[in-house]
Image (spheres, rainbow, N blue to C red):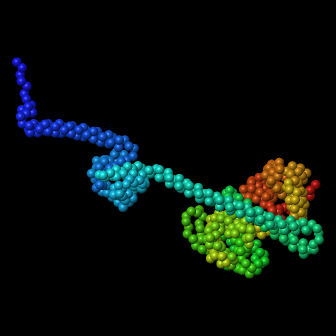
């Protein structure tokens, strides 16, 4: 027998229509609620999944990411952000940003974060983060509950950018300096061409006119004086150029011995006295004779003084004055010298000339620099003298300075040189050198001198000078000719050029020194050459020459030096 199925609530209360409606409504609401609950559960699961996915994504981002709420408390910190801030996420979550990093308060970080959150606009900026000594690139994006911030360390990029900027700046400076150097070089070459050509005009002009034989003694003397003056000027220009070349190559060497500055100053004044008299310039001296000796190269010290005095006279108008002072000043021993510094000899040269423009004053000792290098300039020169003065002074352990109140106010140059105590044997050597330099050139009567030079004009000039002093001269143009002459008769002295074709003077001298004494192996020899550097002098002495003389040479000086080296020769022999 079939059992009867129980009735539903609807069937039970079918007779009550209102109740039935109520139950149907309840049933529908229950089903809807159940669906909503299920949906909510699904959404929660999905949200949790999304959060996990977002967190995973944020963790995999190479940049640092943080999220703060509207109260600036950390809601999220990814591992890269924690690493950059040298903290763990747990150290930061829930803390306020300004508490963790108070040193960014008032900085661009705070200003930009607040602007982004207040104005609801994204911001992007770069700023130095002082807490960790790094540069950060920052992006901040606002949302309803706070601010999402991503940042990355760009310190290396900033460093590279700074290096590029510095490199560009150095390149700009180098380009500017190169352009300036090229301009100065072009100006210098133009001046050089002018200064070297200018003396040639009166030399060549007067030489050609004198050959006509139409001039009396007075006009001839005036012409010869002009030729000599301009030749000396050109020789000095060339010597300055050679000195600069030696300086720039580090080849300039000093021949050091004790020097009396009073004597050196008086000698320098004597060399410029004629130029001063021509302009009616008075030279006043105040020289302390008790300053003492300095350790230096006499010739180079003379060069320093001559350059400064020449400049003073050049830039002083007619009727002006030049004052030269020598005094002893005290100085500190800085302990960087082997010698005992006893003080400083200070030479001050003051003129009443045109003065120096304050803008040019810092450049006055630079190579190839002239205050006026235009074609309308009033004063000649190459702009090398003061640069050489500075270098030579510093080589002596001294200091040179320039001072001027401005144009038309004159100028003062001060040279300070250390006074160094010297052993007595060195003092004796200095006095001996001075006495030897003072030897009056005697007659060369009866001396047999062999000249070797490949330049015919120089051979004839040297022969003429020597013959005028009584020497018996034989001239040859090559090493082979000289050796052939020596096979017949050995001369008392050899005057030999260095730069010659095939066999130069050094090689010839070595060949001669290899000969036995009776064949001329011990003959006196003088190198007369345009190779005038200190290195060349040492080479000549090493090859066997007793003396090295530089071309061009003054005839009086030449005869004096020849007389000195031959002073002990008393016998007279005749060439066969």
* Residue 58 coordinates in the image, percent (x, y): 35, 43
* Residue 286 coordinates in the image, percent (x, y): 67, 79
Residue 110, placed above or below residue 203: above
Identify the residue at horizontal 57%, vertical 71% (top origin): 331
* Residue 426 coordinates in the image, percent (x, y): 67, 65
Identify the residue at horizontal 86%, vertical 56% (top origin): 455
Q: Is residue 132 left or right of residue 396?
A: left
Res. 229 visible in picture: yes
What quarter of the picture does the N terminus occupy? top left
What quarter of the picture does the C terminus occupy? bottom right
Observer-nearest residue: 296 or 490?
A: 296
Count up the numbered dots.
0
Identify the residue at horizontal 53%, vertical 53% (top origin): 164
Identify the residue at horizontal 66%, vertical 76% (top origin): 407
Q: Is residue 376 left or right of residue 141?
A: right
* Residue 554 coordinates in the image, percent (x, y): 82, 66
Residue at the extreme top: 1
Observer-nearest residue: 74 or 364?
A: 74
The quadrant in which residue 214 appears is bottom right
Res. 396 visible in picture: no
Residue at the extreme left: 1
């Amino acid at each position: 027998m079939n059992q009867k199925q129980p009735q539903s609530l609807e069937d039970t209360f079918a007779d009550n229509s209102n109740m039935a409606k109520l139950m149907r409504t309840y049933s529908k609401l229950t089903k809807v609620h159940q669906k909503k609950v299920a949906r909510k559960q699904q959404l929660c699961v999905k949200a949790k999944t999304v959060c996990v996915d977002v967190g995973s994504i944020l963790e995999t981002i190479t940049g640092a990411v943080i999220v703060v709420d509207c109260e600036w408390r950390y809601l999220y910190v990814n591992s890269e952000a924690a690493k950059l801030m040298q903290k763990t996420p747990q150290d930061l979550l829930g803390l306020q940003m300004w508490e963790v990093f108070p040193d960014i308060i008032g900085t661009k970080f705070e200003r930009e974060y607040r602007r982004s959150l207040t104005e609801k606009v994204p911001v992007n900026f770069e700023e130095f983060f002082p807490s960790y000594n790094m540069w950060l690139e920052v992006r901040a994006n606002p949302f309803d509950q706070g601010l999402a911030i991503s940042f990355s360390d760009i310190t290396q990029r900033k460093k590279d950018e700074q290096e590029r900027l510095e490199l560009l700046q150095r390149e700009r400076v180098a380009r500017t300096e190169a352009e300036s150097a090229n301009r100065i070089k072009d100006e210098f070459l133009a001046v050089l061409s002018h200064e070297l050509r200018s003396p040639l005009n009166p030399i060549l002009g007067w030489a050609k006119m004198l050959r006509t034989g139409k001039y009396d003694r007075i006009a001839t003397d005036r012409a010869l004086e002009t030729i000599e003056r301009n030749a000396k000027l050109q020789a000095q220009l060339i010597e300055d150029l050679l000195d600069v070349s030696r300086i720039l190559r580090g080849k300039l060497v000093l021949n050091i011995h004790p020097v009396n500055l009073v004597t050196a100053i008086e000698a320098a004044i004597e060399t410029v006295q004629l130029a001063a008299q021509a302009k009616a310039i008075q030279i006043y001296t105040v020289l302390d004779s008790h300053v003492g000796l300095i350790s230096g190269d006499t010739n180079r010290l003379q060069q320093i003084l001559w350059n400064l005095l020449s400049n003073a006279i050049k830039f002083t108008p007619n009727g002006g004055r030049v004052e030269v002072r020598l005094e002893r000043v005290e100085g500190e021993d800085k302990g960087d010298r082997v010698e005992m510094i006893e003080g400083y000899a200070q030479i001050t040269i003051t003129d009443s000339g045109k003065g120096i423009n304050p803008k040019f004053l810092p450049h006055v000792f630079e190579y190839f620099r002239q205050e006026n290098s235009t074609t309308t300039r009033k004063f000649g020169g190459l702009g090398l003298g003061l640069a050489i003065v500075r270098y030579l002074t510093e080589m002596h352990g001294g200091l040179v300075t320039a001072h001027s109140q401005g144009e038309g106010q004159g100028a003062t140059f001060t040279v300070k040189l250390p006074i160094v105590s010297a052993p007595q044997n060195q003092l004796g050597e200095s006095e001996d050198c001075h006495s030897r330099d003072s030897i009056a050139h005697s007659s060369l009567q009866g001396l047999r001198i062999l000249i070797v030079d490949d330049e015919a004009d120089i051979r004839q000039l040297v022969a003429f000078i020597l013959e005028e002093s009584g020497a018996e001269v034989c001239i040859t143009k090559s090493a082979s000719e000289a050796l052939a002459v020596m096979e017949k008769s050995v001369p008392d002295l050899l005057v030999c050029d260095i730069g010659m074709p095939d066999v130069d003077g050094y090689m010839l001298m070595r060949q001669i020194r290899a000969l036995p004494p009776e064949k001329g192996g011990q003959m006196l020899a003088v190198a007369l050459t345009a190779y005038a550097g200190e290195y060349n002098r040492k080479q000549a002495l090493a090859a066997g020459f007793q003396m090295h003389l530089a071309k061009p040479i003054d005839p009086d000086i030449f005869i004096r030096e020849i007389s000195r080296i031959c002073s002990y020769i008393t016998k007279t022999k005749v060439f066969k």
